[in-house]
């Protein structure tokens, strides 16, 4: 139990470190913290019940648990020493899998009258927990509804609208996805829901950044350049939101921003804002997606949301 508590102490330390937040701002009931807390309590309570049980748990389970804990700690620590995002994702995914296996194996032993460790029962419980968790998150992403309805009466405002970046085509033209985000951003500005717009997103070598392309399009629409804030170095949603937090939201004492993106992307974006103590509403762009395309994007976002909840990497 003490080893497992150490794992989650390290996890929370790295999660807040990744978000560049002070440890004293930890709030247990934020989603990522709550998910990891439930894992810790479930496993720990079962282990405590074994300690007070008349029957001893077999040694194979004991050593297997120690191995899983040490393996998960190793992957968690290594994930914070690699800068390549793909390697980080692999290591954090491995960490999460070992934690689910630990919970599954503990449940497997708990369900055994003789407190024996069964591999196939553990595998079944592991697959069940993983499938139920992923289905739950997928539905949250797929069925997410934006906040546009709250603005229809015309009496609700925010400090700024943030158009989250998307791909640029041909070096200087917005992709259809970015085009629809720009159009929605212009719409909320034109309706005076916000007095300014933030355009975000870096770019590849030898092409304009996503933010610069969005800025040029908005100026063509007639928006005063003075009403635009530019962030053009980020490579992820998390970096975009952290930039807004550090250079605009906190320094200007903003109370609320509107996030503009595709509907499948907004759930994670809003979760990142919540974790960083930023109040945000969401407006979905009108990007047309087929059922298959929408499901594919939502599957990708499902894993991205889980990754963010666990590690703070977005």
Image (cartoon, rainbow, N blue to C red):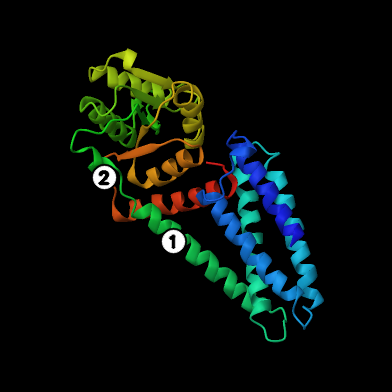
Question: Seen in the image, is 241 located left or right of residue 170?
Answer: right
110 w.r.t. 198: above or below: below
Front: mark 2 or 1: 1
Do the numbered discs 2 and 1 sit on residues whose CB atoms are within 8 Å? no
- Residue 185, image x and y in percent? 29, 30
Q: Is residue 224 left or right of residue 154?
A: right
Q: Residue at x 53, y 46 (%)?
A: 308
Of residues 244 and 154, the one nearer the viewer is 154
On-image quarter of the N terminus: bottom right
Residue at the spot 32% in from the left edge and 18% down from the top edge: 216
Position in image of residue 258 (x %, y %): 34, 34
Q: Disc 2 marks which residue?
A: 288
* Residue sitting nearer the eye, 309 or 298: 309
Query: Which dot marks residue 136?
Result: 1
Mark 1 element type:
helix
Q: What separation in Å lies between label 2 and label 1 (alpha carbons)?
A: 24 Å
Mark 2 closeness class: few <14, some 14–19, many ≥20 residues within 10 Å: few
Mark 2 or mark 1, earlier in chain: 1
Could you tell me which residue is drawn at 54 percent across and 67 percent down?
129
x then y, percent, for residue 294: 34, 51
Where does the image place residue 167, in percent across and percent down from the top left? Answer: 40, 33
Quadrant of residue 126 in the image? Answer: bottom right
Q: Nearer the viewer, residue 102 or 232?
A: 102
- Secondary element type, mark 2: loop
């Amino acid at each position: 139990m003490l080893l497992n508590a150490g794992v989650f102490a390290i996890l929370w330390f790295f999660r807040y470190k990744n978000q560049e937040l002070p440890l004293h701002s930890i709030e247990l009931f934020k989603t990522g913290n709550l998910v990891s807390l439930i894992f810790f309590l479930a496993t720990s309570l079962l282990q405590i019940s074994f300690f007070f049980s008349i029957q001893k748990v077999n040694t194979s389970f004991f050593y297997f648990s120690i191995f899983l804990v040490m393996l998960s700690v190793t992957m968690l620590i290594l994930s914070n020493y690699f800068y390549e995002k793909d390697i980080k994702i692999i290591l954090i995914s491995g960490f999460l899998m070992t934690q689910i296996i630990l919970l599954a194996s503990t449940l497997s032993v708990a369900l055994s009258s003789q407190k024996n460790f069964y591999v196939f029962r553990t595998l079944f419980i592991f697959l069940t927990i993983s499938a139920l968790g992923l289905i739950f998150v997928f539905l949250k992403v797929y069925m997410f509804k934006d906040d546009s309805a709250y603005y229809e009466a015309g009496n609700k405002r925010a400090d700024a609208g943030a158009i989250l970046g998307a791909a640029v085509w041909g070096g200087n033209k917005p992709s259809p996805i970015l085009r629809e985000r720009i159009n929605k951003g212009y719409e909320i500005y034109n309706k005076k829901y916000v007095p300014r717009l933030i355009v975000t997103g870096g770019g590849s070598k030898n092409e304009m950044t996503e933010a610069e392309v969005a800025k040029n399009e908005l100026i063509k629409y007639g928006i005063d350049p003075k009403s635009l804030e530019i962030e053009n170095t980020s490579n992820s949603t998390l970096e975009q939101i952290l930039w807004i937090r550090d250079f605009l939201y906190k320094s200007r004492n903003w109370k609320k921003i509107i996030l503009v993106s595709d509907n499948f992307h907004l759930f994670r974006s809003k979760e990142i804002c919540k974790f960083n103590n930023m109040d945000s509403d969401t407006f979905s762009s009108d990007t047309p997606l087929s059922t298959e395309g929408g499901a594919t994007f939502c599957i990708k976002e499902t894993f991205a949301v889980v990754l963010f909840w666990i590690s703070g990497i977005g």
